[in-house]
Amino acid sequence: MRLDLNDDERRRAQKGQAVEVTAPGTDETYVVIAKPRCDAEVAAADISEGIRLSQEAYRRDLPDLLRQTSLPGQWVAYHRHERIGIAQDGNTLLDECVRRGLPDGEFFLGWIHPYGLETEEEISSRPGHVFGPANEDS
């Protein structure tokens, strides 16, 4: 089956807005969004609740952390809504989370930087833990 979108529908779908279309000949209605937006939504749904809550706490605190001149460039760890600590390197915080017995998928390590969560990557040695930008020390 092929669905043709007009220019307005295509623009809305590319912006991530859902567009209802009716399939010719069947009168079945479908909701269409651009694939990159759909992929982002699916990826967001795959994030565990613990990491999602930890990232929310990180985003909430990041403006205050950035105002403290000694903190930008350091790392911060969260377990859900609780800040675990701040350190010069992510491994120190990872060790602390492990020492506390926090399960995979329940905490987040972020880099204190104006770009915040824009550059995330999974740490291959500990699946499920998300760090900020690539760092040779992490």
Image: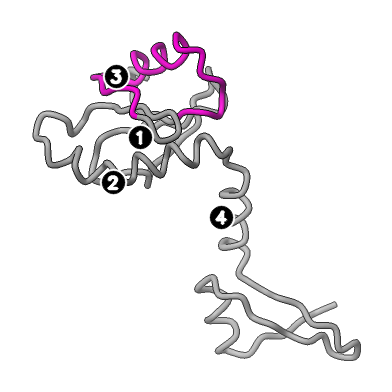
- Secondary structure under badge 3? loop
Q: Is residue 111 above or below residue 15?
A: above
Contact, mark 4 vs mark 1 (Cβ under 8 Å): no
What's the residue type where badge 1 is placed?
Pro
- Secondary structure under badge 1? loop
Measure how far apart labels 1 and 2 are at the Cα level. Answer: 9 Å
In front here: 57 or 88?
57
| Residue pointed to by mark 4 | 40
| Residue pointed to by mark 1 | 133
**115 lies left or right of 97:** left
Contact, mark 1 vs mark 2 (Cβ under 8 Å): yes
What's the residue type where badge 3 is placed?
Asp
Badge 4: few (under 14), some or many (20 or more) residues near its Cα, within 10 Å?
Answer: few
Say whether disc 1 or disc 2 marks the residue closer to the N-terminus.
2
Taking the spot 31% from the left edge, 46% from the top edge, the residue there is 60
**Which image quarter: residue 127?**
top right
| Residue pointed to by mark 2 | 115
Q: In the image as oriented, which residue stretches furthest toward the left?
A: 69
What's the residue type where badge 2 is placed?
Tyr
Taking the spot 79% from the left edge, 82% from the top edge, the residue there is 29
| Residue pointed to by mark 3 | 89
Measure how far apart labels 1 and 3 are at the Cα level. Answer: 12 Å
